[in-house]
Every structure is written in structure tokens, then in C-alpha cells.
Image: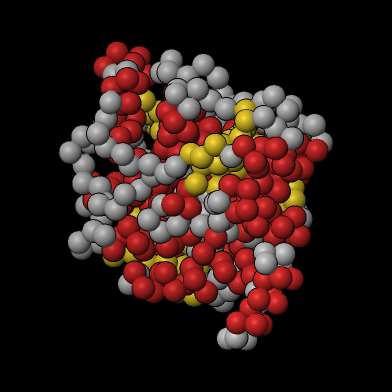
Amino acid sequence: MAEIKELRCVVGGCRYAPDEVRYTCPKHGELGALDILYDYDRLRAGLDRDAISASAISDCWRYKPLLPLAADAIVPPLAVGGTPLYAAPRLARHLGLERLWVKDDGANPTGSLKDRASALVLARALELGIGIVSTASTGNAAAALAGLGASLPDMKTVIFVPAAAPAAKIAQLLIYGAQVLLVEGSYDDAFEICMAICAEAGWYSRNTGVNPFTTEGKKTVALEIAEQLNWTAPDVLAVSVGDGSIISAVYKGFRDLIELGWLDKMPRLLGVQAEGSSVLAQAFLSGAAPEAVRRGRANTIADSISSELPRDRAKALRAVRSSSGAFITVSDEAILAAIPTLARLSGVFAEPAAAAALAGLERAAKEGLIAADESVCLLSTGNGLKDVARARQAVGAGRRVAADLDAVRQALNEARLL
Ligand SMILES: *Cc1c(COP(=O)(O)O)cnc(C)c1O
Ligand SMILES: [Zn+2]
């Protein structure tokens, strides 16, 4: 376990004692997301990376010494994290790169990286003695909370999702037995409603950009990538961005390792947004401060990165700017096309929002943002089975054939297999 030293506001550097504030900075409101910081000298003195590498625990709890939990904290029993990092030489060649890895976070228990945040938030709720945890979500954060909540006795979860979320995601929530409210509005509508009800009812809020434990949970993906690369960082890490919470957490994970002296550099973070939901990319390009970011439009097939007002905007802009990274936007057509490209050249089936990272890499490589000899990690954030309708849109419904050998032979002949 890592003892929290202080909470620090990303906007004004305001500092708080560990138990002083639960969500965002009282002075800077919702924009003032908090960083959970540790006494790094003390951590370094008591722990080294070899001890982590020797851990017999293969899921994200192998990093418990770097997480804000008591050593004996109860955590959900499902195996969150410990996801594979695949070398992807054919995909690298497609991009004109020499070295590329795909981190497949779609392999998590509920199919997305969001499990990492939900697992830590639920563990924290147990520490706080709160029995109801709630979130608004475009789908994956909700599925993660519902699924991991269902793995614990006596834990209730209440979910607010847009009624238009993909069918598989809604089915997941209902299957896990969460209390689900399908809000007839946007994700942003669901978010505001959830925030208000959590405050009113005293439930623990897992909401992105609000609860600092979400960042700490998601940072474990960066810790894993560094360890899987033998305690080095790639030159560039590409990740899709909606609310900006994942990219912020990736930054925090690498930052913690650098503070500990376990890693010597921060990768350049490439944030990929859909053209139709690109508030952060625009703010980055115009050099805007987080305070100046205004609500925009959100219209993309990649529902997991659809956000009118990215909730973790302050942390996300900091992550990209201080890593000398960049934001890039991609069209829905490019996102759809990236799904089969990723699957066929690496074997990883990603949902649209996750495949967007590949579409962004394609564009970044073409525009010279990445040199051929740089090492690159593509973070695939969610499983392709989450949104089969969009996957079918990319590849069609498949070829039908009569149950007849001659017809089959002819079809195989046309496919040049016979
Ligand atoms: C949530 C999510 C994202 C975007 O993460 P943000 O923290 O909102 O930027 C990307 N891909 C998938 C699959 C997600 O579920
Ligand atoms: Zn503040």
C-alpha cells in the first residue's frame, strides 16, 4: 500500500490532506481534478521494482504498493489488469514503423480498460463503508462498475447511461444486476443527473474526472506497459480520448515511475479524438488553457469517446502538453476502417473507440509526427464484441452459401482458395 501524502489540484496546485476532500478541489470546482500524490522518497526507500517484478500476483493488484489502499484492503475478486502486450510487427510495417506493441485492455473482465478504475473505486468504497456506488457512463465505465460490483457481496451499483448506448453494453449492465437508468439524453445529460443524485443521496461517485481514485486505478495500465517492456517506456503511446481520463492516468502512471526512479522517460502521449467529438484536440491546437475550454458537439460512431465537455480536460491537456505529445482527430470512416485493420494485422478485435487509436497512429505516421525508428505502443481500450453492429458496418454481414457442396466449391473458387 502507498500512503497518500496529499491531494493536489491540477488547476491551481491547491493542496489537501488525504481525507480532507473526496472529489474535486473546492476552490476550482469541477475543473479542479485532484492528483493523489505519495511520499516518493519514502516509497523508493521501502520498495524497488524488482520486488514488483517478483510478485506472484498477475493482475493489477501486483501494483498495490503504488496504489492508495491499505495493505489488507478488500478488492473485487475478478482479475482486472494483467492484460497482454503484444508485439505487432505486421501492423508496424503497415504504419511504416519498426517497433509497435498493442496493449489489449479489451481482455479485461468486462471488456474494457474501465475495469481498472472501477476495481479501485469499489475497493475504496469498501474502505469508506459505503454500500452504493454510482456512475454515469457511455457504457464501459458502467459495465465495469456493474460487473465488478456484482463480484462483491452487499455492493449495490446505480448506473446512468444514455438510452442510445450500444445494445451489448446495456445488456451487460442488466445482466450484472445493476440498477440501470437509461437516460433519454446525451452522456453529458446522464453525467449531470448522476452527479446531482450522488450528492443528494450520499452515494459514492465513480464519475470520471471527479473521483481521483479512477485515475489511480487506470494508471496501472502504464505501470504494466513499463514492466512488460522491462521497465522502459515506448517513445510514443497512442490512446483514444473522450473525457480524457485514460490519457491522464497513463501520464500519472509513468510520472509515478519516473518519480520513483524506476523509469527514465515519459513517452509522448498521442491523444486521438473523433472529428465529431474533438473539444480537447481543438483546445490543444489553439493553445487554450483548461479554463477556456467550452462545451462542444459530440457526434461520432465511437460512443466511448463521445463527450461534449471532456470531464478530465485539465489533466488531459497537462498530460499531452507536458509529455510533448499531441492531439489528433480522425473521421468516423477512418475509425470504422481501423477495426478490421487492427484485427487482421494483430489479432486484436477492438470496439470503435479503441480502434480510433490506430486511425490516429495512421494519420500521425503519415504526417511525420512519429519517426520510423521510434517505438510505439497502441493502447486498445475496449473489446470489439462491445459493438458488433459497428463492426458489421465495417465488414458487411458476410457471404451466404447454400448448404450444397457444389455451391461451396464455387464460392471457395471465387475466393481463390480452391
Ligand atoms: C472510456 C473509453 C475511452 C476514452 O477514455 P476517456 O477517459 O473518456 O478519455 C476510450 N476507449 C474506450 C473503449 C473507452 O471505454
Ligand atoms: Zn484548486
In which quadrant of the rendered view does residue 326 lie?
Answer: top right
In which quadrant of the rendered view does residue 262 lie?
Answer: top left
Q: Does residue 41 appear anywhere in the picture?
A: yes
Name above or below for residue 259 compared with residue 332: above
Instruction: Give how far across and how far down residue 341 sits, in percent.
Output: 67, 53
Instruction: Give how far across and how far down residue 233 sits, in percent.
Output: 53, 25
Q: Nearer the viewer, residue 365 or 163?
A: 365
Q: Does residue 29 appear anywhere in the picture?
A: no
Q: Nearer the viewer, residue 274 or 125?
A: 274
Name above or below for residue 157 compared with residue 220: below
Which residue is found at the position 35% from the left and 40% from the top? 60
Which residue is found at the position 44% from the left and 42% from the top? 84
Name above or below for residue 138 compared with residue 359: below
Instruction: Give how far across and how far down residue 124 sits, in percent.
Output: 29, 46
Q: Residue furthest left?
A: 72
Q: How many marks?
A: 0
Name above or below for residue 192 compared with residue 259: below
Q: Is residue 53 left or right of residue 392?
A: left
Q: Nearer the viewer, residue 170 or 16?
A: 170
Q: Is residue 114 left or right of residue 152?
A: right
Which residue is found at the position 31% from the left and 26% from the top? 52
